Amino acid sequence: MNIILFGPPGVGKGTQGITLANEIDIVHIAMGDLLRAAVKNRTALGQEAQSYMDAGKLVPDTLVIGLIEERITCVDAAKGFLLDGFPRNVAQALALDEMLAKHAMLIDRVIFLDAADSLLLERLGGRLICKACGFGFHRHYSPPREAGLCDQCGGELYQRDDDKEDVIAHRLEIYKEQTQPLLQFYSTLDAFHQVDASGDIKSVYQLILDKVQ
Ligand code: AP5
């Protein structure tokens, strides 16, 4: 099964996407994670992408489209993949359609997660991530057992640079301008489902699972 999970920053794409991909045994492909890895490894693409990410802007399509094609055609993605954070505008959606046709692949579900801006601000403002394994926590909603340390591996927790208040506000603006138009692009497909992501993590997961099953 191939799935697109999209929605505003902080709505829970990563939180839900990782759990769902594990449960149905497909690969979780998060564009944000691919880009952060490129920045950390100081690749040419990472160096180009960094200033856009720090400012909360979208990285140019030419960079992300190549990256996603490389990833979905890796051997491990043959069993199915969940795209988290791609596509993020109509040009990327069109490029994805072309790529899928070229590799004889189909998308089985497009799941749109939505929640009010006030909730997104709260979720992003409190997010903590493990430096070592990337596992996500939230200061209030899902705090680590020991402050500052990951429950999974004991690694140090940090706040993403783009989770600072002014950058979050900009990311939400960019989302409304560039990503929200994808709703029109996908909402007429039979594969499309909208999920209210304002509940707690478990209840949102159940709603998503219902759409996938
Ligand atoms: P990316 O990393 O994809 O960021 P994003 O889309 O802004 O999404 P987030 O990762 O911030 O949020 P999420 O929805 O995954 O929420 P999460 O599950 O962590 O992209 C970063 C940057 O990379 C972009 O700004 C851009 O520069 C670039 N980029 C990425 N893709 C690109 C593309 N296609 N084209 C161009 N540029 C691109 O949850 C957030 C917090 O809330 C966590 O703490 C979590 O524990 C908590 N939480 C989640 N769900 C719940 C719930 N139901 N109840 C309570 N708490 C919850």
Image (cartoon, grey):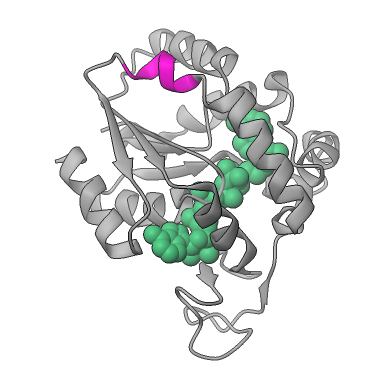
Nearest to the observer: residue 114 or residue 1: 114
Tell me if 119 is positioned left or right of 168 in this view.
left
Residue 33 can be seen, yes or no: no
Nearest to the observer: residue 111 or residue 105: 111
Report the quarter where the C terminus lies.
top left
Is 128 colored magenta in this rendering?
Answer: no
Farthest bottom residue in view:
146
Instruction: Please state the horizontal and vertical placement of residue 75, each as a whole percent of the image.
Output: 42, 35
Instruction: Please state the horizontal and vertical placement of residue 183, each as a whole percent of the image.
Output: 43, 22
Tell me if 115 is positioned left or right of 80 in this view.
right
Vertical relation: 26 (above or below) 203: above
Vertical relation: 56 (above or below) 155: above
Identify the magenta region: 182-187
What residue do we see at 51% from left, 19% from top?
Answer: 181
Instruction: Please state the horizontal and vertical placement of residue 8, each as a whole percent of the image.
Output: 52, 40
What residue do we see at 47% from left, 49% from top?
Answer: 11
Tell me if 141 is positioned left or right of 54 in this view.
left
Q: Main secondary structure of the magenta part?
A: helix
What residue do we see at 68% from left, 20% from top?
Answer: 61
| Total tally of numbered discs in the picture | 0
Tell me if 1 is positioned left or right of 179 in this view.
left
